[in-house]
Image (cartoon, helix red, strand yellow):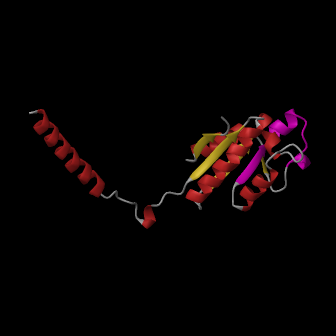
């Protein structure tokens, strides 16, 4: 009796499994592809987080080559974009060359007495980093907090 019930369940499981394997998932039509826009919020002085962020940007760019990506650095996160302080200057420049936008909060620069000239070339500036993030979210951008 147990062998018969087990064989029946096994057979039923195989049929269900087979039907799941053979079902094709619907893929969106070419015209329905989503335009991915992601804003990253960076406020940590953790250099390991900088390395992780640059890897994440590369991974996303490889998956979605046309995605709009922006990193907003404020507070202690501006160190990632400070010449002479950052441990990822080459990775940042490579990401910029690949279309990733990096912006620095001018309010943070003012509060921390950091000059704009000390920021890596080609970085942008926004008046207030958190306002930039909120406005991106209100415009439909996805939000990712950089760091661990």
Return the residue found at the far bottom. Answer: 30
Q: Nearer the viewer, residue 39 or 139?
A: 39
User: Residue at the spot x=61%, y=53% of the render?
Assistant: 59
Q: Is residue 9 above or below residue 89?
A: above
Q: Is residue 96 above or below residue 53?
A: below
Return the residue found at the far left. Answer: 1
Question: Is residue 108 covered in magenta?
Answer: yes
> Where is residue 90, by image quadrant?
bottom right
> Where is residue 144, by image quadrant?
top right
> On the rendered image, what quadrant is the C terminus found in?
top right
> On the rendered image, what quadrant is the N terminus found in?
top left
User: Residue at the spot x=65%, y=51% of the render?
Assistant: 57
Question: Is residue 115 covered in magenta?
Answer: yes
In the rendered image, residue 79, in percent from the top left (x then y), is placed at 82, 40
> Where is residue 5, by image quadrant?
top left
Magenta stretch bounds? 101-119
């Amino acid at each position: 009796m147990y062998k018969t019930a087990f064989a029946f369940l096994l057979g039923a499981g195989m049929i269900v499994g087979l039907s799941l394997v053979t079902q094709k998932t619907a893929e969106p039509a070419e015209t329905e592809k989503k335009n991915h826009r992601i804003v990253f919020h960076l406020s940590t002085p953790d250099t390991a987080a900088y390395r992780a962020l640059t890897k994440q940007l590369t991974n996303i760019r490889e998956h979605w080559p046309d995605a709009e990506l922006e990193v907003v650095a404020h507070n202690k996160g501006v160190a990632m974009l400070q010449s002479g302080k950052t441990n990822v200057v080459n990775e940042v420049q490579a990401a910029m060359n690949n279309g990733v936008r990096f912006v620095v909060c001018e309010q943070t620069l003012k509060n921390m007495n950091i000059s704009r000239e000390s920021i890596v070339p080609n970085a942008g500036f926004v008046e207030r980093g958190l306002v930039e993030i909120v406005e991106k979210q209100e415009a439909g951008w996805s939000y990712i907090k950089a760091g661990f």
